[in-house]
Structure formats: C-alpha cells, structure tokens
Image (cartoon, grey):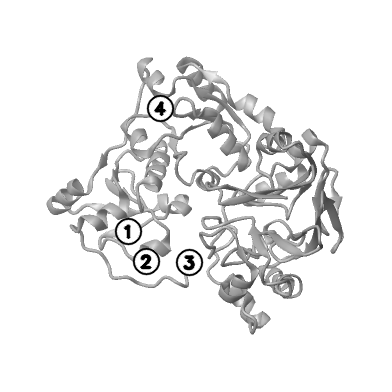
Amino acid sequence: MIIEQIYTGCLAQGAYYIESNGEAVVIDPLREVEPYIQKASKNGAKIKFVLETHFHADFVSGHVDLSKKTGAPIVYGPTAKPGFDAIIATDGQEFNVGDLTIKVLHTPGHTMESTCYLLKDASGKDIGLFSGDTLFIGDVGRPDLAQKVVADLTQEKLASYLYDSLRTKIMPLSDDITVYPAHGAGSACGKNMSKETTDTLGNQKKTNYALRAEMTKEEFIKEVITGLVAPPAYFPLNVMMNIEGYDSIDTVLERGNQALSPEAFEAAANETGALVLDTRAPQTFAAGFVPNSINIGIDGQFAPWVGAMIPDIKQEILLVCEPGREEEVVTRLARVGYDHTIGYLEGGFEAWKKSGKEIDQIVSIDTAELSKRMQANNIEIIDVRKKSEYLSEHMVKAENAPLDFINDSMAQLDKNKTYYVHCAGGYRSMIFNSILRARGYDNLIDVKGGFKAIKESGSFQLTDYVCPSTLL
C-alpha cells in the first residue's frame, strides 16, 4: 500500500496518490498531470479513479486532463453537477482500489458537494480520512465561498451545514485515523491552518477550535465566520472552470511557450493589449524592466497575487522570466486558471536591454538612506501590508494602503507627490510600485527589506502593538 501526499507549497495544496495491488487513485490532482501518470507507470499500476473532494476555488484541478489521459472516471460526492462525464457518488458508496476500500462521506458546508473519502485497509479498518476543505489541521473550510457561486446560499447556512457534517460524519470516527487535508498554512481557503499537513483525528479533536465537543451550533457559526476577509477575485472563476472544464494543459503549455525576440515581443504587446508580467525577483526587476510591465516574483506567493492583481483570467499575458523558468511560470499560471499566456521574451530582460530598446527603473533605497531622508525632510511613507499587519505595528508616520485593495489604495495617492513604499519584506511593495508605475505614478520609491528591515534597524519610531484579532 502507498499513501503519498504531493504537497505544493506555493498553493499550500495537498494532492494524494494512493496505490494498492496494481491499482491507484489520485485525489484532487494539480493541473499538470504527467507526474501522476509517470508515478503509476513506474510502479506498474493503473489509475482507476480520480477523486475530487469538491469544486475547488483556489486552483484549477487536473481532473479533466487526468481522466482523458488515463481513462479513469472522475468521482464527485452527492449534489455535484459537473459539465462533463463523472460518477456522482451516493453518501456511503464504496470504491475498491486493490486491497483497499474508499468510502464516500458527504460533508456539505465548505461547499454543498464537499465530500471526504475514508480509506479502509484490507481488513476493513479505517486508516485515513482525505478531508478536502472540510477539515484542515487546526481549522475548517471557510463557509463563504460557495455563496459567490450559488446565490441563495449564505455563509451562515453553509456554516450550519458544516457544523452538522463535522459532528455526524467526522467526529464519530476513530481517534487514530490520519487526517489528510487539501490545504495547509498559507491557503486562503481557511483562516487558521497549521504548518503541519497531516495529523491524527484524535489530536484534532483536542486542539482544533472547531471540533470542541461542547460547542453549540450558534457558537460554531460565530467563530467560523468571524474574521473572514474577502477571498481573491479569481476564486469564483476557478470554480466555474472546475465545473465546466477547460483547455488541455498541453494546449496551454504549447501556447505559452512561444519564444519571442525583443522585436516580436514588443509587437505582440502593442498589437494584442497583453499584460507584460515580469516574474523576476523584486530588486532585480527594480534595476531595469520593460516599460509598463508589472512585477510578481515567481519565488514569492505567486499564484495568489496573480489572482488578486489580474482580475480577468482570460487576460492575454506576455512573460519576462529568468531564462529557463518560462515553462514553470506558464504552468503555475495555469494552476490558477490563467491559460492565455501567449509567449515569453527570449533571452529574458538582458536580450531586451541588448536590443537597445527603452527600459524603465524603480528607485529602491535601504533603511539607512530612508532614515537620512526622514531627518532631512517631511517625507510620506506608504505601508502596503494588510490592515491587520499595519495595526499590529507600523511606522508612526506611515499611512496604510493595502496591496489587497490596490484600486482603493491608489486613490489615496497624488501622482505629483513622492512616496516611500514598503511592505513586510519587499515582495508586495514591488508589485504595488510596478502596477502604479504602469499607471503613471512616477514618484514612488521602494524601501528594501520592508518592515522587517525597518524594525531591525532600530532607527525608526514604531507604534505599540495593537491586537488585531477582530480583523484577521
């Protein structure tokens, strides 16, 4: 028997490969499905089923492609209505995989079709629960996402369903089974997830606030919905792709992996209205970039920020990447539904520079220089961290303009004024600066290292800590 969690850190997402006696299933696969196919082939196994715990919002699942390439049927829980062929299982239905049995547990709450899969060994003993977004380590799935897709659902209704699902389907299970959730810390599908990606159910009953035995439904609803922030705008769009289907990942990769000379790249940008996305490190970008491009670094929280900053998943995109990482970037965009990359700058920014074409820069200073300028002049400082981060601790003179709400934040600024912009570590501030630079804000200066460097320098007056618990 093989149970393998395939965890993808940038999405904080766990897919699962389960194999027994020459048969395998994959649960909640990522968009790129070749690794699952190769794993099964290497082991001499056949993928028998593709199991989906629900219609995901934060990423586009690979279920459609994996099913087409292997012939394995897609399985959803009760009430699911996909736009493609699938087995819609009944509550309690069982599927055999080699010597193992997988039982369907319908657990509405995060979404109405949400389903957990209970794994039984050859003797019939319960050994694992693949809990999707119903139960996380330290948290449960947020109940406000499906209301964006189904109008008559409210977060209170969904939270009520979730309370019942946890107490009738999950909490009665044996304490010694292992919980395998679909996400960990960093995912926007919950608010208090642990860094750990598996745990025993018994330990979760002791430590997870949502599984308190004495908790009333009213208390549960209040605690689960308190502190929820608005989900990224791309979430409902990903849900619809997961429901309706999508282009093959092979087609997306072929379209996106078109190498363009600087001349062809410039022509494509001018003729198509494509967005130029530069995925290099923030400080590398600041030193020189293609005019009007925006920076979202591939080595940061790439997918969530792409989803937050580019509202139209059908937007055509041209890429500037570190040479050799183009396919990685196209793939990671496709994971969250951005399928319309139309090419990349061959040779990267250095090729653009060598061609003699116009370049742009963003001034970036360290904290020592910031301190000098503050002493010499009354400068304006913009903190683009989340409101909760800002309220926790910030520079006394800083104004909060969260990147999460960039259009509102942009309205606070005067194009004719100079602003010094920082975030927590320098990643988000460069996103902010690049977007505003492309919109004609030419007087933004980036602070290297962000608030971490500001605090470590000891040169600046900071506010006292204010607990932001009601805003998290």
Q: Residues within 10 Å of mark 3 (few under 14, many from 20)?
A: some
CA separation in Å, label 3 and label 1: 19 Å
Q: Position of residue 185 (x, y in %)?
A: 52, 58
CA separation in Å, label 4 and label 2: 35 Å
Q: Which residue is mark 2?
A: 391
Q: Position of residue 195 (x, y in %)?
A: 51, 59
Residue at 29%, 45% in the rendered image: 448
Which mark lies nearer to you, 1 or 2?
2
Circles 3 and 1 in contact, beta carbons < 8 Å: no
First in sequence, mark 3 or 4: give its number. 4
* Three-letter code for the amino acid on which mark 3 is drawn: Leu
Circles 3 and 4 in contact, beta carbons < 8 Å: no
First in sequence, mark 4 or 2: give its number. 4
Q: Which residue is mark 1?
A: 399
Report the number of discs.
4
Residue 472's tag is 3
233 up-or-down from 107: above or below: above
Q: Which residue is mark 4?
A: 290
Residue 193 in view in this figure? yes
Residue closest to the eye, 432 or 241: 241
First in sequence, mark 3 or 2: give its number. 2
Q: Position of residue 438 (x, y in %)?
A: 41, 36
Q: Residues within 10 Å of mark 2 (few under 14, many from 20)?
A: some
Location of residue 295 (image quadrant): top left
Q: Position of residue 65 (x, y in %)?
A: 74, 37
Answer with left or right where residue 265 lies relative to residue 446: right
Which mark lies nearer to you, 3 or 1?
3
Q: Secondary structure at mark 1?
A: strand
Circles 3 and 2 in contact, beta carbons < 8 Å: no
Which mark lies nearer to you, 3 or 4?
3
First in sequence, mark 1 or 2: give its number. 2
